[in-house]
Amino acid sequence: MKMNKIIVANLKMNILSKTERDQYLELFQKELAGKKIKNCEIVLCPPAIHLEGFEKAKIKKTKIGAQNMFWEEKGSYTGEISPLMLKNFGCEYVIVGHSERRRYFCERDEEINFKIISALKNRLMPIICVGESKVEKDSGQTLKIISQQVKNALEKISRTKAENIIIAYEPIWSVGTDVIPTENEIMEAKVLIRKILSGLFGVKYAEKVKIIYGGSVSSLNVDQVCLKPGLDGVLVGRESLTPHEFIKIAEIIN
Ligand code: 13P
């Protein structure tokens, strides 16, 4: 089975004004024009306040995603954003369980699981982030951590949802550091994740889940972190703030 690759831009808490947003979108459109990126899905995940602006820009061949959501659909939850809102504002994807949310907002596996269940129920594709810290890596716990996080994230989720799930292996020590894992380390993580998925969903359904890599991805290393280990795409942080660089990554993967 041949799946389209997926290139996700996590713009994080950047793009500080409407003017900056419009400049970004204009540049993005300009950079994308005339490029033949047929075998990739491009997903832009701006801060929630810009979702409407990104949606209105209707950039061809790109989809919109959110960086986070709450699991309840509506009600007295001050400051939260519901999956229904995301859907109604044109989102098709949502990043869930990013290490920055686990770290700064104390998100735990249980809450991440609630969010994934709710996203799927509301027809949003969750991009589930898993990965170990430097301390965990150095003490040989990488595979244990990945295994726990994947299993906990997917608890009570039916295998019929497999094709709507994306797992991003994003080692915390690689986020924002320009240090990347070896091809072998990524292969190992991929094989483990696929094995866990097979245990949960059965081999046939497990293969439908996309596994991507995140952490210091650039056009210079995309071969090592995605193509060589045979992953289904990448989750890009800093380099997504420069449309030229981001689209270069998409072109290489394509
Ligand atoms: P960087 O690409 O800036 O390391 O960020 C990765 C990331 O956190 C994407 O979700």
Image (cartoon, rainbow, N blue to C red):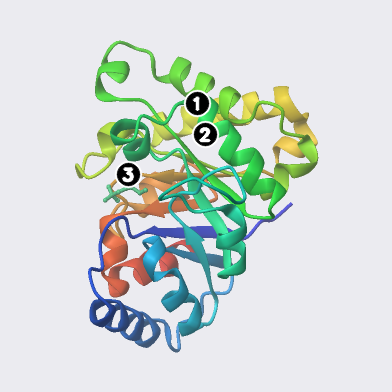
Q: Is residue 209 above or below residue 11?
A: above
Callout 2 environment at 10 Å: few (<14), some (14 to 19), or many (20+)? Answer: many
On screen, residue 125 versus residue 128, left or right, reads: right
Looking at the rendering, which quadrant does residue 157 occupy? top right
- In depth, the one of 118 and 61 nearer the eye is 118
Q: Earlier in the sequence, mark 3 or mark 1?
A: 1
Residue 109 marker: 1
Residue 158 marker: none
What is the count of numbered marks? Answer: 3
Name the element at disc 2.
helix
Callout 3 environment at 10 Å: few (<14), some (14 to 19), or many (20+)? Answer: many
Q: Is residue 169 above or below residue 45?
A: above
Q: Residue furthest front?
A: 76
Measured in 3D between alpha carbons, the distance from the residue under mark 1 to the one under mark 2, in whole angstroms, is: 5 Å
Name the kind of residue labelled 2 in the image: Ile
Q: Residue furthest left?
A: 177
* Residue at image mark 3: 215
Measured in 3D between alpha carbons, the distance from the residue under mark 3 to the one under mark 1, in whole angstroms, is: 20 Å
Depth check, mark 3 against mark 2: the one in front is 2
Depth check, mark 3 against mark 1: the one in front is 1
Tell me if label 1 and label 2 are in contact, CB under 8 Å.
yes
- Provide residue 49's location: percent of width, then percent of height: 38, 66
Residue beneath the point at 74% across and 43% down? 161
Name the element at disc 1.
helix
Name the kind of residue labelled 1 in the image: Asp
Residue beneath the point at 31% across and 17% down? 136
Residue 112 marker: 2
